[in-house]
Image (cartoon, coloured by chain):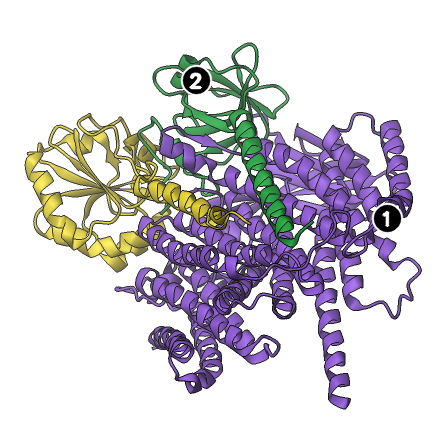
Chain colours: A purple, B yellow, C green
Amino acid sequence: MIAEAGLAALWLAFALAALQFVLVLLGMTGNRGELLGAVRPVAVVQGLFVCAAFALLIWLFLRSDMSVKLVAMNSHSAKPFIYKFAGAWGNHEGSMLLWVAVLALAGAGVALFERRLERPTLMATLGAQAFIALGFYAFLLFASNPFARLSPAAAEGQGLNPLLQDPGLAFHPPTLYFGYVGLSIAFSFAVGALITRDVGPAFARAMRPWVLIAWVFLTIGITAGSYWAYYELGWGGWWFWDPVENASLMPWLAATALLHSVTVLATRDGLRAWTVMLAVVAFSMSMVGTFLVRSGVLTSVHAFAVDPTRGSFILALLAIYIGGAMALYGLRVGTVKEGSQFDPVSREGALVANNLLLSVILCLVFLGTLYPLITEALGFKVSVGPPYFNLVTGPIALILVAIMGAGPLLKWRRDELKPLVNRLALPVLISAIALFALVAFAPRAHILPLLGLVVAAGVAAASVAPLWKRNLRRTPGFVWGMVIAHLGIAVSMVGMAAESSFTKETLVAARLGESETVGPFTVRFDKIEPIAGPNWTALEATLTVVRGDGKPFVLKPQARMFSSPPTETNEAAIATRIDGQLYTVLGKEDEQGRWQLRLWWKPWVTLIWLGGGMIALGGLLSLVGRVRRERRAHDRKAYA
Amino acid sequence: MKKGWLLWLPLAVFGLFFGIVAYGLINPAERTIDSKLIGKPLPQFALPAAAPGIAGLSQADLAEGGEPRLLNIFASWCLPCIAEAPVLEGLAGQGVQIDAIAIRDKPEDVAAFLKRHGNPYKRIGSDVDSRVQLALGSSGVPETFVIDGKGIIRYQHIGDIRPEHVPVILDQLRKAR
Amino acid sequence: MKAKHQRLTLALVALAALIGATLLAMSALKDQAAYFYSPGDAKKANVAPGQAIRLGGMVEKGSIARDPDGVTIRFALTDGRASVPVRFKGIVPDLFKEDSGAVAEGRFDASGTFVADNILAKHDERYMPPQIAGDMHKTGRVE
């Protein structure tokens, strides 16, 4: 019964989305303006129904109802509670339901809270949101029904991919989806504004908080995903340029550009057409990402659904939504009035440079991700990996970050080069010191990480410069947000550069009792023993680690064997210290009774994710700061 | 004046993307490939019994008797195999002889599977490390091969056998005679 | 500068940047994309030492040997037409064994040995590149 109720809720939500779209269509074209009054409530109720459907799916997973195909395919009654819960979205159908739920929730959020947008634009926006939702409901209902029954019921489930059985998984995809799909609001705003031709500062101010929310979630999702891959795959890397990772990076790049161009539009009424384009591109990248992951056209570590019909379905949706929005752009944006102008040397100029460089990186990642597909069409097979992505994006990212340091020190509209040089003197000095120190103490570092450390040092100093001589308590939240986010980029970059140039690796075959050294650590291989978990058995090594004269501690890497489905995974054991992480992996036994051990000392690697967290925190502060400031302005108006 | 065509550039870029991807979807990379062993004799193998009370399987067993038969690749942990079980029972009921190889499985699991979903098999070999499966050119579970009376592989069915596939299977068995 | 001119300038700069990006990407892809070869194709194409490629084939029976250090493994990959010696230092995936498919990522050294940075085993739940299909009669099909 629960499965049927879930399906019914999904159908109702589908009907409500259709109703919402029709209401907007009739209300805005004919003289039936009164219909528009019903749009907001319908959007909210639609959101509630999808959430109900999703809650019911989770309930089915928690009950291990093996008569439901999805549960039987992806769950197992012996699975710990949290993975039954997370299993609901650790598969194609469930994750698509989550996707649509976030889409509908975002629409409901706009219907409930958006008060600044002009009414016609708001209505067009909600109409666009409903139109997007319609396609994805149809996809769920007709091509990937999560509530399909299995007859006869299975005695036991097939289990969840062991790699996905990790606490990180429970929160990683939902966070990412809130970001990914939250960008749909920016897309719908852009479509709405193109329809009403109402692109201006008011539109930008209305759109900004929504973009910020989505961007914060996306940042957290990517950061968490990177850490998950780092400790779960046991390969010691933190970014693999896997198509699925790129699918989340591309919307982030577009959203970051959008976040900055929307500020230009809100503050200076510039970059009108460009901002609209970016809003369309950002969510388009989310949809393209969904397509790449879900259709299996690019097989990757994560691709769990490979089904050409589904792929064609999503591709058709892409054609309708992205193609439609871009056609509308071509038709309408010429009629959007020109915004105000600015000098090349100005805050706007720096933001334009930021946007261009982000777009270039986006373009490079996009081409690299799709290249295997292009060549396959031409008849030969290639795989594009880290060598390409690091080579092309690294230098451009460096330039981008350097400009990021200077941008906030520029005045809006026009500025002079000379005072800028004065303002940048200290950061440049710090960079120079960093360069000398590195050349003196780490002469063998590669050029790119070396430059990364040098630039990051200067940019860190430049990032906090906007706080200089300010009353810190009266500094608005969005300035704090910017400072912390920019500082986060510098911090993260230090982590990446340090990891790539200072990592020490030891790969050995060790006997019990033997000691190995890696970086400043001495690792003694004490014992190996079998242990059992709820749905796996493992061989666990006990490693006693000492750093210099410090207190010894114990690390226990495992090689796990899961029974359903039968799979082996390596569970790395990681010790986090203030200046980095010791990462240990247990390999196989050889004929002479020696065990392969892989040990890494990764100095400052944690800064990568710390920086990511700071970037997200910066976004959050900026959001809170903007909202509070506007509420205060609103209150003042009310008293006056 | 801004050139009009610039406004249509994004749409054009998307069109290009759409074309490439649509092509990729229509001509999918070879994701399922038929075994190259069709028309060739079975590889050498001898597998122990997969469950108590049922004999194991070797390639010699498959060639004996001179009658064509089915070789089913399955596993107790495989869900489509459950869906396939009644169809196989139906085939067995029509007098088709079916042997099987259980992939990466445990005897108690196989026994439980047979108890719950029926046992259409004459012999079941246990292939704990997929070695024989690989040698046969099978890429997943379930899969079913038609073997003629001389131990030559005649036909390969990838995925579960649904009722609509039964006529094809029977036809192939007839042809293998 | 007139407003309209600025808009046009910006559009053209953006266009130039994107075209530049495409050209950069294409030239980098020419050098950096790892082409997939079977041992026979690699011999025929005479792949230059140092070029990053993926080599996919069957692990030849009896060819697996471990160096005394316990972490370096040598084996031969074959597709029936040619056989290539491979050296790999690291932890091999659990499904890596004789007579089964594997993909090695890496490059040839001057002596013609393929030095792998990474080994992907077929039927490994962790990784099933469709390229494995290639010339072989098996494929990594996701069930």
Determine if marks 2 and 1 fall on one subunit.
no
Identified by mark 1, the residue type is Ala
Residue A229 visible within the image: no
Residue in front for this viewpoint, B69 or A75: A75
Residue farthest right in this picture: A469
Q: Residue at x 39, y 77 (%)?
A: A16
Residue at disc 2, secondary structure:
helix
Residue A156: horizontal and vertical position, in percent? 37, 60
Residue C11: image location, x then y, percent: 58, 47
Query: Is residue A291 positioned above or below A234 on the image?
Result: below
Query: Residue C83 location in percent, x, y?
Result: 42, 15
Check the residue under mark 2 and report the chain it is in: C
Where, by quadrant of the figure, is residue A77 drawn? Answer: bottom left
Q: Nearer the viewer, residue A91 or B23?
A: B23
The numbered disc on residue C42 is 2
**Secondary element at tag 1:** helix
